[in-house]
Amino acid sequence: MQPRVATALRELEHGGGGGRALRYIGRPPAGTTATASLAIHRDETRAIVDAALGEGLVPTGAEGLALQ
């Protein structure tokens, strides 16, 4: 991830980010790595994907991927 983050920061620094800021989207810190509930996991995953792609961003190479 480090090379991609470095590239993103360079692009933002030089105005290529279209006014967007780099920010973390993911689960909050927790004592465990899993929720122990499939329903909660699906809700969290959907919320993360919606937040990450909600600004019209399209992931490179993600054609054909779907959240089930």
Image (cartoon, rainbow, N blue to C red):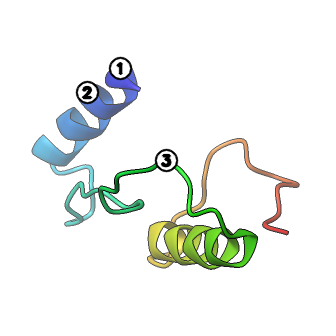
Residue 35 position, x and y percent, is 56, 63
Dots 2, 3 in contact, CB < 8 A: no
Q: In this image, 54 relative to 17: left or right?
A: right
Circle on res. 3: 1
Q: Position of residue 42 (x, y in %)?
A: 69, 72
Q: CA distance from mark 2 to mark 3?
A: 26 Å
Helix, strand or loop for disc 1: helix
Residue 22 percent across, percent down from the top left = 23, 54
Which residue is nearer to you in this view: 7 or 24?
24
- Closer to us: 16 or 64: 64
What amino acid is found at the position of numbered circle 1 in the picture?
Pro
In this rendering, does residue 51 appear at all? yes
Residue where numbered disc 3 is placed: 33
- Front-lying residue, 66 or 28: 28
Depth check, front residue: 27 or 66 = 27
Disc assigned to residue 11 = none
